[in-house]
Image (cartoon, rainbow, N blue to C red):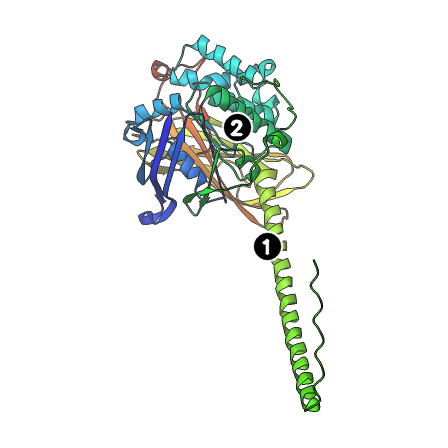
């Protein structure tokens, strides 16, 4: 495997003035481990999406074994993603109504890369290799965060990809589980031989890579991180098999007294000392003010960090269900979950919108709240479900999955620990992606091109992208 990205650029916004990625180049060969670090919004995820053939570059080329992946047809590129690339996103995005074994086998079944019995045999083997052989028939809802993450790793490897892309794969795990997941990925890379690109904020994890890059305002540049002691970095495994096939200066001499003009010199010296004392006082005052301002800035940064942690980690959200009401009408249910039920979280000014992909653009469709109170202030102590009604009567929609619409739900909300916030408010935005079955397409039509174990689902959740 040889991946060559040349001068990739991605622009967004009116007249395409905003550059999320600028002139980025990257080389990767089979078995190599590369990490990319950078602040949020620096363009890391956008670069990963271009490398994974999820979003096209505005300029530049991506060659995979000499083939420009963005010169392939849409069908060819979909097959390429299915067979050559494995994805691990920030959130597990497992199908809640399927077992761990089913979740791992799904990409092989949808992509028709192997027979169903072969797909399930390989899915079970992968689950055993990540230490979940005895949990193969468990539902995702009964599994811990670390177990769900291992299922995602197995799912990403089901089609034996030659390139694995991971976007913050351990961001929601504790330190021990995080180390275990990285040990597991490193061992699988050694045994499977795939190229591995890791996007992370964790410099310790990034330092484990053979090469590290940093993204700053869309610019990709080589970075040098402190070397990680491999032996010291290893943690005792908390799951799975132990082996995966895987001096002081002298004081100045006093000056001799000068008798001539001593009084004058003494007066000048006194004047100078007084001036020096005054200047020192001014400097000391200025230093004190600067120090106070620094403290205020640090305290504000801490408050913002606490707000961000509460809004992004303490408050969890996802799609609970999408129901087909007929004639192109649907009901969407989205839940909010307070992960730390000991402290309430207040949510206000929710703005949910729905879009269907038509060609390369997103067409907005009508959506309205189905319940009262969506636009007010809501106290979240545990789990709360919002419901919306939307219409998706769109023609000529893009079919990334045969006969299914590609739908995006965008949610914006203000999050605060107070019901009457002042400056303790955090704006959170979420995007949810699903494949949605049109009301006017029969199950028989879908089953001609897709193979499902049962009745074709109304909706299929997609990882964030």
Position of residue 407 relative to residue 190, above or below, is below
Q: Distance between the residues labelled 1 and 2?
A: 33 Å
Provide residue 253's location: percent of width, then percent of height. 71, 73
Q: Which image quarter holds the C terminus?
A: top left
Name the residue beneath numbered marker 1: 423
Q: Which image quarter holds the N terminus?
A: top left
CB under 8 Å between discs 1 and 2 = no
Q: As rendered, which of 50 and 214 lies closer to the eye?
A: 214
Provide residue 57's location: percent of width, then percent of height. 33, 38
Horizontal arrangement in the rendering, residue 42 relative to residue 345 (left or right): left
Position of residue 378 relative to residue 297, above or below, is above
Position of residue 232 relative to residue 193, above or below, is below
Residue 378 is at least partly visible in this image = no
Which quadrant of the view contains residue 44?
Answer: top left
Q: As rendered, which of 308 and 261 lies closer to the eye?
A: 261
Horizontal arrangement in the rendering, residue 113 relative to residue 428 (left or right): left
- Of helix, strand and loop, which one carries label 2? loop
Q: As rendered, which of 281 and 225 lies closer to the eye?
A: 225
Provide residue 424's location: percent of width, then percent of height. 60, 51
Residue located at (53% from left, 40% from top): 201
Q: Which disc, if any, is residue 154?
A: none
Q: Which disc, if any, is residue 92?
A: 2
Packing grade of label 2 (10 A; few <14, some 14-19, many >=20) is some
Which quadrant of the view contains residue 340?
Answer: top right
Q: Quick one: label 1 or label 2, which is nearer the N terminus?
A: 2
Position of residue 432 relative to residue 118, above or below, is below
Packing grade of label 1 (10 A; few <14, some 14-19, many >=20) is few
Residue 345 is at least partly visible in this image = yes
Provide residue 460's location: percent of width, then percent of height. 45, 24
- Of helix, strand and loop, which one carries label 1? loop
């Amino acid at each position: 495997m040889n991946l060559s990205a040349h001068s990739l650029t991605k622009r967004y916004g009116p007249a395409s003035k905003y550059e999320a990625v600028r002139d980025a180049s990257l080389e990767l060969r089979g078995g190599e481990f590369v990490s990319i670090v950078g602040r949020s919004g620096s363009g890391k995820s956008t670069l990963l999406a271009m490398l994974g053939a999820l979003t096209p570059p505005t300029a530049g080329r991506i060659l995979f074994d000499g083939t420009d992946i963005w010169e392939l047809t849409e069908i060819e590129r979909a097959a390429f993603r299915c067979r050559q690339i494995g994805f691990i996103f920030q959130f597990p995005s497992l199908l809640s109504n399927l077992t761990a074994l089913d979740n791992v086998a799904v990409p092989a079944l949808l992509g028709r890369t192997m027979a169903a019995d072969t797909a399930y045999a390989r899915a079970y083997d992968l689950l055993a290799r990540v230490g979940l052989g005895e949990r193969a028939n468990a539902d995702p809802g009964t599994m811990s965060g670390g177990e769900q993450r291992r299922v995602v790793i197995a799912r990403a490897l089901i089609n034996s990809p030659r390139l694995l892309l991971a976007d913050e794969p351990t961001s929601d795990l504790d330190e021990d589980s995080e180390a275990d997941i990285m040990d597991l990925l490193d061992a699988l890379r050694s045994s499977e031989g795939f190229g591995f690109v890791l996007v992370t904020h964790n410099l310790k994890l990034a330092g484990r890579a053979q090469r590290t890059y940093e993204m700053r305002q869309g610019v990709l540049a080589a970075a040098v991180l402190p070397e990680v002691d491999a032996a010291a970095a290893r943690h005792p495994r908390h799951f799975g098999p132990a082996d995966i096939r895987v001096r002081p200066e002298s004081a100045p001499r006093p000056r001799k007294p000068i008798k001539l003009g001593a009084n004058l010199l003494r007066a000048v010296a006194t004047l100078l000392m007084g001036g020096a004392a005054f200047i020192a006082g001014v400097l000391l005052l200025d230093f004190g003010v600067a120090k106070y301002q620094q403290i205020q800035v640090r305290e504000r940064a801490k408050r913002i960090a606490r707000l961000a942690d509460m809004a992004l980690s303490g408050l969890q959200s996802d799609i609970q269900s999408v129901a087909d009401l007929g004639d192109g009408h649907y009901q969407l249910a989205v839940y909010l979950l307070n992960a730390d039920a000991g402290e309430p979280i207040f949510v206000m000014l929710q703005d949910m919108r729905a879009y269907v992909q038509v060609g390369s653009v997103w067409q907005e469709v009508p959506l309205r709240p189905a319940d009262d109170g969506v636009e007010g202030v809501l106290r979240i102590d545990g789990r709360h479900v919002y419901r919306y009604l939307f219409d998706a009567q769109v023609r000529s929609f893009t079919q990334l999955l045969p006969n299914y619409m590609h739908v995006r739900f965008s949610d914006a909300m203000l999050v605060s620990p107070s019901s009457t916030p002042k400056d303790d408010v955090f704006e959170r935005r979420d995007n949810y992606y699903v494949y949605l079955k049109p009301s006017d397409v029969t199950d028989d039509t879908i089953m001609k091109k897709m193979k499902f174990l049962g009745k074709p689902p109304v909706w299929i959740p997609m990882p964030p992208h």
